[in-house]
Amino acid sequence: MEEKYTGKWEDYFKHRDFVHQVGFYAPDWKAFVENHHRIFGSGPFYYTTNTFGKLLYYGEEVDCAGLEFHAAYGAWGSHSVEVVEQVPKDVPTMFRAGNDMDAVGINHLHMFVEDLAEAEHACQVLEIPVATVGYPDLTNALKKAEATGTSKEDILANAGKPSFMVVDMRKQLGMMVQLITPRAKRLHDAILRAAIDWDGETNLLRKLG
């Protein structure tokens, strides 16, 4: 690993923009969206299916063939909300580790980091277990890039690199944290922009790639 971070590794997570998105698990993502919107007025929600080229669970590679995260992302005030329905339920992931797979529940908060390899090293120093590391399914990622106008060159340049990492801070703080790079901020910002002129009801659900 080429380490670019020059500070003390024990201080790696200090003073970062911590919560920009709250991640939930739900056995029925659409019902969750409808309830969240009914209660909080959140939305609009963009939904998609995420698949993976490789998945690590507490350091061990798992069989992720056929694994799908049916996900929806929506604006919630100045923040955003993510909900994921995992199919099938029995594949070991951060949801299996942290949730009752038959009930709705918060799974993680989000934090931006510059580099996931650096973040993983910081977790080793701080003795924070890494619950899940996901590597994108390149075919699926390219299809989404075409549908959303994302740069295919950017997708190809990051092929083989992890797209997200969820670390298990339950022992220290009772929560999991998903670490993502600034590339993912594009989706977050687009979701918040979509809410600015939204009438609060029309087209609550919008397909994302």
Image: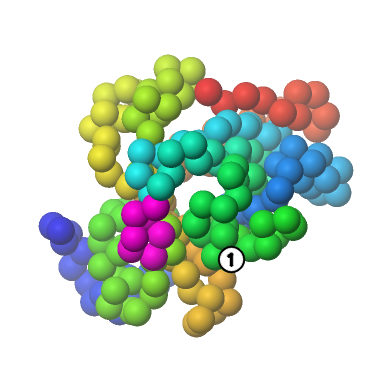
Quadrant location, the N terminus: bottom left
Front residue of 125/13: it is 125
As drawn, 172 above or below 138: below
Query: What residue sits 50% from the left and 56% below the top?
Result: 93
Horizontal and vertical percent position of residue 38: 86, 43
Q: Amino acid at mark 1?
A: Gly
The residue at which mark 1 appears reads as: 98
Quick one: label 1, few (<14), some, or many (20+) residues within 10 Å? some
- Residue sitting at x 26%, y 40%: 160
Task: Farthest residue to the right: give it.
Answer: 38
Question: Farthest residue toward the bottom?
Answer: 172
Give coordinates of residue 122: x percent, y percent. 29, 70
157 sits to left or right of 90? left
Magenta span contains residue 102: no
- At a point 34% along the width and 54% down the height, the residue shown is 61
Q: Which residues are magenta?
A: 56-62
In screen coordinates, is 116 left or right of 96?
Answer: left
**Count of labels in the image:** 1
Which quarter of the picture shows residue 58? bottom left
Along the viewing direction, whichever of 203 and 169 lies nearer the viewer: 169
Q: Is residue 71 above or below residue 108?
A: above
Magenta: main secondary structure: strand
Q: Give the side of residue 7 with respect to residue 206, left or right.
A: left
Q: In the structure shown, which secondary structural element does the residue marked by tag 1 occupy?
A: helix
Q: Which residue does the image show at 29% across and 74% down from the upper left?
A: 124
